[in-house]
Image: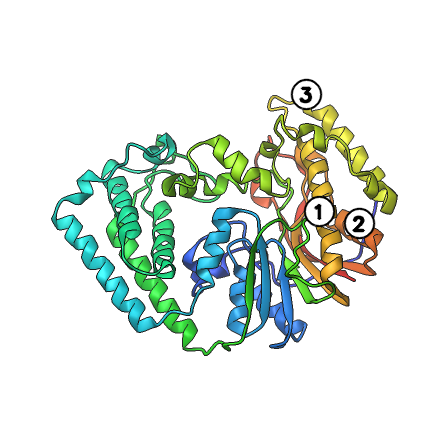
């Protein structure tokens, strides 16, 4: 088995979103797949990043990396393939409001809401056109209020940045105002998971006020006006002409974990509510098909043939990885047919490493020689077959021409499931993989 020296670092929460839940701007959208902004701050200090530095996050998600670096006055580029999450990041990164005008706009918006309430317009909110999942998540009273707020925002006479801020506040309201088990990552609209829903109007009003206060806090700290932040809605596997070769000082990210987490399903409630999608098929075509393979739900009839074998260039540049990985994939294929769910973990793993190979190659092109690509990631053990993701990616990187890699342990994972007799007993971890070009 391939091995690599690991060192323990006392920062076990760097790979989680815990710190960001309470931090200005970061908390505008709670993303369970995110990581700590404190990790970005620590790396900015460790690498002595300056105002002239450029940092790339190829899986920027809801914008943690770019928000943190913008606060620090460091240039950044973020790439995100998920269209709704990209919109969230874009909204979180716009701070160039005239705050007195924004305050007046918010007050004016709220007056229009109150006027509509007084005229009984809430009862006329069209909720019937929403998909069944949305109806299952809310009482009729709260759903009517949420739709009324959504429609009032769309009619509101203001610039798109202000409307986006209001839309994002409403997005954050959805799960708080839901009676369903709507915590992360998935929606559980059944009587077994019901919770007390928060009243929609008061929750929305509180969140808008919090967002305005966060903008006051951020802008009072005088972020340099010439700090650049470029967001790209696109695929980390693709070439992006706006990023010149050998121009990036540091690449830092947390790619999808190989744990069968459906990143597309995570935003299904939000996308249904705002009309970005209306069915599982819409989500598959508009989101799942664009993302790095990390869930069995992405293995459909259309792409199953494409992920049946590992890329031949993986065998060419890293034959030991190819052989070791292929053996585990075949083991999973044998186990799958004995399981009730018959989940296609074997194909998911092939798709993941085929995709990440392309990401590693693309990052090599834009990273400066001697500089680092830092990844927060975890290993996995589908059906009890251990996949040492960090080692495979590190060895693939060396095969592509990177000079070296190291692994730092953040924390162990899966301990809370130890009592579950259906779960595998393979110890898992979360780590930082640092690859040097």
Left or right for 11, reference 207? right
Near-viewer residue (390 or 294)? 294
Reading the image, the residue beneath label 3 is 338
Quick one: label 3 or label 2, which is nearer the N terminus? 3
Quarter of the figure with residue 195: top left
| Label 3 environment density (alpha carbons within 10 Å; few <14, some 14–19, many ≥20) | few
Residue 63 percent coordinates (x, y): 52, 58
The single residue placed furthest to the left in the displayed view is 119
Task: Locate residue 253, reporting x and y percent.
Answer: 63, 57
Which residue in the structure is indicated by mark 1?
A: 356
Viewer-nearest of discs 1 and 3: 1
Quarter in which the C terminus is drawn = bottom right
Determine which residue is flagged by label 2. 396
Query: Upstream in the sequence, badge 1 or badge 3?
Result: 3
Residue 182 found in image quarter: top left
1 and 2 marks in contact (CB < 8 Å): yes
Label drawn at residue 262: none
Judged left or right of residue 425, residue 279 is left
Q: Which residue is drawn at 70% across and 67% down?
A: 247
Numbered marks: total: 3
C-alpha separation, residue under disc 3 versus residue under disc 2: 31 Å
Q: Which of marks 1 and 2 is nearer the N terminus?
A: 1
Going 68% across and 25% down the picture, which residue do you hit?
Answer: 336
Q: What element carries label 1?
A: helix
Q: Which colour scheme is used?
A: rainbow
In terms of depth relative to the viewer, which is nearer, 378 or 164?
164
Front position in the image: 302 or 355: 302
Residue 353 image offset from top left, x and y in percent: 72, 42
């Amino acid at each position: 088995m391939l091995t690599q020296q690991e060192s323990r670092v006392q920062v076990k929460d760097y790979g989680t979103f815990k710190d960001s839940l309470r931090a200005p701007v970061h908390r505008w959208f709670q993303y369970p797949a995110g990581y700590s902004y404190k990790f970005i701050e620590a790396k900015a200090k460790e690498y002595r990043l300056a105002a002239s530095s450029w940092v790339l996050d190829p899986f920027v998600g809801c914008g943690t990396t770019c928000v943190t670096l913008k606060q620090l006055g460091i240039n950044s580029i973020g790439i995100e393939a998920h269209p709704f999450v990209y919109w969230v990041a874009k909204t979180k990164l716009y701070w160039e409001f005239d705050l007195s005008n924004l305050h007046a706009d918010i007050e004016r918006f709220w007056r229009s809401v109150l006027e509509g309430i007084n005229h009984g317009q809430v009862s006329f909110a069209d909720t019937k056109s929403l998909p069944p999942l949305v109806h299952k998540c809310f009482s009729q009273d709260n759903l009517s209020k949420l739709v009324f707020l959504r429609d009032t925002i769309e009619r509101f006479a203001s610039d798109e940045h202000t409307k986006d801020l209001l839309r994002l506040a409403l997005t954050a309201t959805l799960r708080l105002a839901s009676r369903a088990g709507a915590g992360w990552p998935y929606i559980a609209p059944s009587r077994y998971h019901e919770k007390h829903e928060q009243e929609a109007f008061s929750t929305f009003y509180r969140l808008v006020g919090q967002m305005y206060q966060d903008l006051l806090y951020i802008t009072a700290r005088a972020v340099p006006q010439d700090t650049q932040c470029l967001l790209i809605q696109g695929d980390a596997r693709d070439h992006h002409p706006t990023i010149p070769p050998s121009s990036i000082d540091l690449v830092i990210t947390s790619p999808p974990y190989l744990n069968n987490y459906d990143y597309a399903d995570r935003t299904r409630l939000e996308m249904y509510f705002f009309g970005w999608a209306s069915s599982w098929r819409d989500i598959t075509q508009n989101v799942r098909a664009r993302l790095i393979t990390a869930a069995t739900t992405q293995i459909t009839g259309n792409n199953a043939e494409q992920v049946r074998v590992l890329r031949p260039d993986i065998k060419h540049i890293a034959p030991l990885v190819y052989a070791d990985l292929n053996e585990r994939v075949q083991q999973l294929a044998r186990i799958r047919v004995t399981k009730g769910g018959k989940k296609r973990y074997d194909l998911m793993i092939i798709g993941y490493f085929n995709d990440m190979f392309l990401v590693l190659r693309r990052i090599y092109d834009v990273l400066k020689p001697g500089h680092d690509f830092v990844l927060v990631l975890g290993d996995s053990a589908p059906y009890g077959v251990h996949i040492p993701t960090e080692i495979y990616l590190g060895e693939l990187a060396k095969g592509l021409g990177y000079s070296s890699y190291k692994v730092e342990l953040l924390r162990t994972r899966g301990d809370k499931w130890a009592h579950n007799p259906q779960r595998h007993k393979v110890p898992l971890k979360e780590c930082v993989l640092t690859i040097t070009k």
